[in-house]
């Protein structure tokens, strides 16, 4: 890829991330209040909804078969279109099964986009630039999310728009931006032809383990941490939106810095810091009785997520170039094995004792910490995990 197209491909990655952030942020920030206020959801209903939402993620491996017929870049754009349309439709169906259907539609677009975007990112970015640029992408998408959350706060508190109006506006904006994206950027050629078949490789097992555990932890955060704020502490939509604004605002500055840190200290150390922090956060969720402390834990939890960049850059360093697209598809399915099971099963655990949900989350963080310490200091093909070959030591000068 020449220098001009390399710059354009980076801009395309940022633009796609911004579209996804705007549309999904509006859907996500209003979901708990919309589900409780308009569809009378219980904790069990919310678990059911998120289990359905994660089914397309579990089936993300099918993306590799679609790529036989269309380009990765085209599939990413079509996925963003479907995401935007699903969000547009959400407000028109305020019932459990209506929300399940629109969520499934939105989720197909979301998960296919995330799968293909992950593959394109690792293909288009040089390894030495990847951690810092991935942090920069999170910064841009966080700013887009900040604008989305601010708009929701403005529309609800000042203009008193109904949910259906806000979802419709977000969907239309997303569709317009997708059309502009399609028109604006050329079709970029892959540097290395991608394998169009499914496979697992033993030497990638640490990456698979980290991916599975990340999916489990993420579901507890997305489904139950936010639900805790609304159900236990009676957070209003405006208060939830304020928290999301704080999260996104912090990530604008923190995520690029985290990307640089990962480049300096390596994936193993960075991920270990994340998982030690998350153990404390999950235990805090289980014990918290103060609304402000719960909010602080929620913000801290969100900031730790930026360190998950290290899982992607670790894989980029150990993987064969032609494996990016197929492994992105397979890894999303691995990520969503837990994602399909946890929301519905943990929803019933929540009905019995909410604190147990978060203690189990701390257990997943412990397992993640163990797996992160399997990453060698200098990961590369042939040195994928700590005993795959002797560690390479640089003698002291």
Image (cartoon, helix red, strand yellow):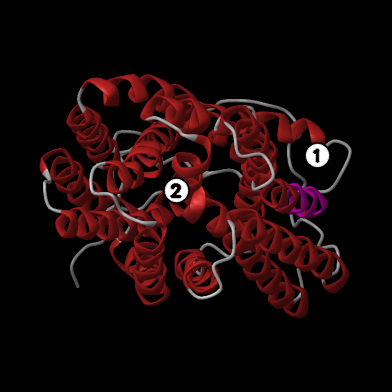
Q: Which mark is residue 33?
A: 2
Residue 49 seen: yes
Residue positioned most to the front: 160
Residue 175, quarter of the rendered image: bottom right
Q: Earlier in the sequence, mark 1 or mark 2?
A: 2
Give x and y (percent) for residue 25.
Answer: 53, 58
Q: Quadrant of residue 214?
A: top left
* Secondary structure category for the residue under label 1: loop
Does 91 sit left or right of 37 as displayed?
A: right
Majority secondary structure in the magenta region: helix
Q: Which residue is mark 1?
A: 67
Image position, residue 125 (x, y; %): 60, 64
The answer for how far apart the CA atoms under marks 1 and 2 are is: 38 Å
**Mark 1 surroundings within 10 Å by alpha-carbon count, few (fewer than 14), some (14 through 19), many (20 or more):** many
Q: Which residues are magenta?
A: 74-82
Q: Position of residue 16 (x, y in %)?
A: 67, 63
Q: Is residue 177 left or right of residue 312?
A: right
Instruction: From the top left corner, tell me how far across and down residue 344 is, in percent.
Output: 43, 22
Is 335 left or right of 117, judged from the image as shown?
left
Examine the image and state in which quarter residue 359 appears: top left
Element class at badge 2: helix
Q: Which quadrant is home to the N terminus?
A: bottom right
Look at the image and tell me whether residue 322 can be seen.
Answer: no
On screen, residue 130 above or below 90: below
């Amino acid at each position: 890829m020449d220098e001009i197209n390399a710059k354009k491909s980076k801009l395309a990655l940022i633009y796609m991330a911004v579209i996804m952030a705007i549309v999904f942020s509006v859907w996500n920030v209003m979901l708990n209040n919309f589900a409780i206020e308009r569809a009378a959801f219980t904790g069990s209903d919310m678990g059911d909804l998120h289990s359905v939402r994660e089914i397309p993620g579990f089936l993300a491996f099918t993306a590799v078969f679609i790529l036989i017929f269309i380009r990765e870049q085209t599939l990413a754009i079509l996925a963003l279109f479907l995401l935007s349309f699903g969000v547009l439709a959400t407000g028109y169906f305020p019932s459990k099964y209506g929300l399940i259907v629109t969520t499934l539609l939105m989720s197909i677009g979301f998960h296919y986009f995330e799968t293909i975007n992950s593959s394109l990112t690792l293909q288009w970015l040089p390894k030495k630039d990847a951690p810092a640029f991935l942090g920069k992408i999170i910064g841009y998408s966080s700013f887009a999310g900040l604008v989305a959350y601010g708009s929701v706060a403005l529309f609800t508190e000042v203009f008193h728009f109904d949910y259906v109006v806000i979802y419709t506006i977000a969907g239309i904006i997303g569709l317009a931006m997708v059309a502009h994206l399609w028109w604006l950027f050329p079709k970029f050629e892959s540097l290395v032809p991608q394998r169009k078949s499914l496979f697992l490789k033993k030497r990638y097992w640490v990456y698979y383990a980290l991916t599975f555990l990340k999916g489990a932890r993420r579901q507890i955060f997305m489904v139950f941490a936010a639900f805790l704020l609304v159900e236990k502490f009676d957070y209003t939509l405006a208060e939830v939106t304020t928290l999301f604004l704080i999260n996104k605002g912090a990530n604008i500055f923190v995520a690029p810095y985290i990307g640089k840190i990962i480049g300096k200290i390596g994936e193993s150390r960075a991920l270990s810091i994340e998982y030690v922090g998350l153990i404390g956060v999950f235990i805090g969720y289980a014990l918290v009785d103060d609304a402000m402390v719960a909010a602080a834990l929620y913000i801290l939890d969100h900031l730790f997520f930026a360190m998950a960049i290290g899982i992607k850059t670790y894989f980029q360093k150990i993987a064969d170039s032609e494996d990016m697209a197929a492994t992105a598809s397979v890894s999303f399915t691995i990520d969503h094995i837990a994602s399909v099971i946890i929301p519905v099963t943990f929803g019933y655990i929540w009905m019995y004792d909410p604190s147990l949900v978060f203690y189990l989350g701390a257990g997943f963080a412990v397992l993640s910490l163990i797996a992160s310490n399997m990453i060698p200091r200098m990961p590369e093909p042939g040195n994928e995990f700590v005993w795959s070959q002797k560690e390479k030591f640089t003698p002291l000068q």
